[in-house]
Amino acid sequence: MIAVELRKLLIRRRTWVSVLLLCLLPVVVAVFLSVTEIAPRPGEGPTLLSAVLGNGALYPAAALGIVLPFFLPIAVAVVAGEAIAGEAAVGTLRYLLVRPVGRTRLLIAKLVSVLAFTLVSVVAVAVTGYVAGVTLLGTATAATTTTLSGTSLTTADVAWRTGVMVLYIGWSMVGVAAVSLLLSTLTDSALAAALGGLAVLVTSTVLVALDAAGAVRDYLPTRYWLAWVDLFRDPVLWHDVNRGVLVQLAYVVVLLGAAWANFATRDVTS
Amino acid sequence: MSAEPVIATSQLTKRYGSVTAVDRIDLLVRQGDRYGFLGPNGSGKTTTVRMLLGLVFATSGTVELLGRPVPRQARSVLGQIGALVEEPAAYPHLSARANLRLLDAAGPPVGDGPAADRTGSRRTRRRRIDEALERVGLADVGRRPVRAYSLGMRQRLGLAAALVRTPRLLVLDEPTNGLDPRGIREVRDLLMTLNQAGTTVFLSSHLLAEVELFCTRVGVLDRGRLVAQDDLSALRGPTGRTVVRVDDGAAARALFGGRVAAARDGHLVLEGVTVAEATARLVREGIDVLEAVPERRTLEDTVLGLTS
């Protein structure tokens, strides 16, 4: 069943169009940067962008920073929202269940396929970022890179930090996927599930920025999304990254548990 | 005929809040039956079908398919069942073959029985799919996406999907929906052939004529209750009246007087007179008898009488 779901994902044109669009934005930004050489002032604009003019090898990180706030979550929410609700809307859900595919098995297969999409997207953006960064912005002279703390990094250092960052951002997206997947088992409208997931995200983002919500801030799903920036400090500040992984884990476990409990016991009337 | 019923429900009930959609029904479908599940729209047919297939969970009561309880052991029996629930459904951007391949690959192979094509095994997949498409008349559809199909073609594809694993039981909800008269005939012939080869067919429909032409056994559902379940011949039993057609209607009327219950299109319906008596008296009076048969209820009369 997992193989079948992955196959469905791969033969779907929409999958590749969204990955392509995700990769396009950082390229466009890179073109503007390389043509104008106007960097956002430090502390303004997308994270890390100020640093990349000096070294294109940092651009994968910057590229993910660009798509992280909006594009990546939208793409993941759409794919996850489609998971069960999409099958229900087309009517294929009942035929899958009657084939028979166990409900738990179907949900797991859908989850794996959403994870695969997330990983492919994040890696594709990182790779595109690297290529665009190196070709358009050039690498730093002595193959060293400056961290946000002002010290130098070797290429190997940049590589593993970028790898961890890809995993961390991927894991953050699993949280988005879990919200939309739960909604996807609750409604027969894929659109509603995707939008619901985004609504949760926007709410969380607004509350994180709101001082009055300080009491709950540390427990909001998007609170530590940008913590991966700390991976590019020297030494790496692990505190927020670790907290982010744990908060995300709690959300993922609870939401997926709820999705399973609902889907395994509900009447399928679509 | 095997003793074990193919479908048996006991006091099967489904309530949605205060509405009872299906009310304590005891369905019994035997091996080899062509069972017609009749009922007006909204009588609970689809909810029942969905409970049979484990899609909707019963409020109370039990379902047994091929001797196994559903939904508890649904996984072990559903692979031997082909189903069409309400409309057929397929991924619109894929071809018929791609759809059938994905669906076949999604489920487990059925290990029951020696026949290689009863399983959902990968080895036989291509052949089984080609055969199913051939049977429903879609062998030449090629690579067009299902999006471009007519309603009738989609219906045929839905049937093909139900046939891919040579099921022991077919559960079909309105299978001739959207087909033209020729298509309806072809589907009926196909189901007849499958039935003769041993497939039990459970056909849910509101089309009385279709059920009357095809089925051997009928269950009638009305507002969630099973108001009749019997062989078709029993439901269409004689009414005890006699229908005659004669060359001189006026004379015959005069002859039978108060016994004439109705007269329509040159036919007289006689109350309390057997065919033999009617014929004898008419002949004695020199009235030519063109036709004399016992009146039978039509399925329509029976069902409309039962379902109010």
Image (cartoon, helix red, strand yellow):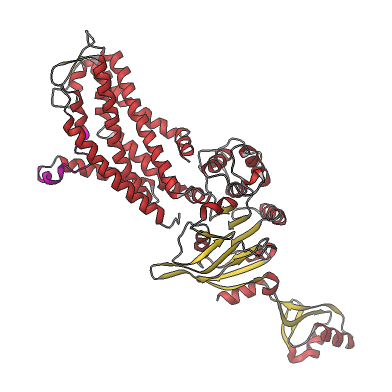
Indicate the quadrant containing the C terminus of chain B: top left, top right, bottom left or bottom right. bottom right
Indicate the quadrant containing the N terminus of chain B: top left, top right, bottom left or bottom right. bottom right
Viewer-side residue, A258 vs A208 = A258
**Magenta stretch containing residue A214, yes or no?**
yes
Q: Residue furthest toward the top?
A: A142
**Magenta stretch containing residue B166, yes or no?**
no
Left or right of residue A81: residue A243: left
Decide if residue A46 is in sight here. Answer: no
Above or below residue A147? Residue B166 is below
Q: Residue furthest toward the left?
A: A212
Magenta segment: A211-225
Give percent across and percent down for residue A129: 30, 21
Viewer-side residue, A169 vs A211 = A169
Image point (30%, 33%), residue name:
A170
Image point (35%, 29%), residue name:
A21
Give percent across and percent down for residue A82: 39, 43
